Image (cartoon, rainbow, N blue to C red):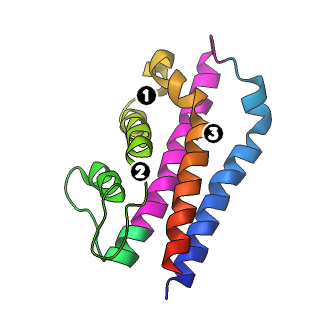
């Protein structure tokens, strides 16, 4: 019943993986202590794309499994909140610790979309950048467990 959804989610996850692979040299050469404006701007774009990819996955789940589409002015927060709860149709997609991590990426997404890159503060981005791969591994594992439960 959910085979097509599972395939689409796997594709989206492969896109996030590809982004990380494509920027492999960038991550190796990144100055995490005192990055310049270009490094901050590139990292900001990567963080934004990462969270946007996750939202695509979360939207597929909420739309296709629960027939739910957040429409409020806080729809991005509502969507993330929804992934952390059990519904009549499914278990929670992500656990509480992962939810808390992703909430920080969501906050950054808002800052990135509504400001200029020269206004970004590395001190506020650094932890997100340093934890990016750990966070992705957690999310990927939990989403994979969830999608397998649908089959």
Determine the CA span between mark 3 and mark 2.
17 Å
Count the labels in the image.
3
Tell me where the magenta segment starts and ends, as one range. Answer: 32-60
Which residue is disc 3 drawn over?
133
Q: Which residue is drawn at 31% across and 64% down?
A: 86
Residue 48 is inside the magenta segment:
yes
Which residue is disc 2 drawn over?
95
Which SS class for mark 2?
loop
Residue 129 vs residue 144, the one in the foreground: 144
Q: Where is residue 73 in the image (x, y as percent from the top left)?
A: 20, 52
Q: Which residue is drawn at 43% across and 20% down?
A: 119
Which residue is disc 1 drawn over?
116
Residue 64 vs residue 30, the one in the foreground: 64
Residue neighbourhood size for the residue with mark 2, other residues' Cα within 10 Å, grouped as few (<14), some (14–19), many (≥20): some
Q: Which-is-in-front pick, marks 3 and 2?
A: 2
Determine the CA span between mark 1 and mark 3.
25 Å
In which quadrant will I find the C terminus? bottom right
Magenta residues: mostly which secondary structure?
Answer: helix
Residue 62 vs residue 147, the one in the foreground: 147
Q: Vertical placement of 132 versus 99: above or below?
A: above
Residue neighbourhood size for the residue with mark 3, other residues' Cα within 10 Å, grouped as few (<14), some (14–19), many (≥20): few
| Residue furthest out toward the bottom | 1
Residue neighbourhood size for the residue with mark 1, other residues' Cα within 10 Å, grouped as few (<14), some (14–19), many (≥20): few
Q: Where is residue 88 in the image (x, y as percent from the top left)?
A: 27, 75
């Amino acid at each position: 019943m959910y085979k097509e959804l599972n395939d689409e989610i796997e594709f989206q996850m492969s896109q996030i993986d590809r982004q990380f692979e494509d920027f492999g040299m960038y991550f190796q050469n990144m100055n995490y202590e005192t990055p310049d404006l270009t490094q901050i701007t590139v990292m900001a774009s990567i963080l934004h794309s990462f969270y946007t990819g996750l939202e695509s996955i979360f939207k597929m789940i909420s739309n296709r499994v629960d027939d739910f589409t957040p429409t409020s002015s806080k729809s991005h927060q509502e969507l993330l909140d929804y992934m952390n709860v059990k519904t009549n149709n499914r278990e929670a997609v992500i656990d509480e610790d992962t939810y808390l991590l992703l909430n920080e990426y969501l906050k950054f997404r808002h800052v990135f979309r509504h400001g200029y890159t020269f206004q970004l503060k590395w001190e506020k981005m650094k932890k997100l950048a340093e934890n990016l791969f750990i966070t992705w591994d957690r999310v990927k594992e939990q989403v994979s467990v969830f999608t397998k439960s649908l089959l």
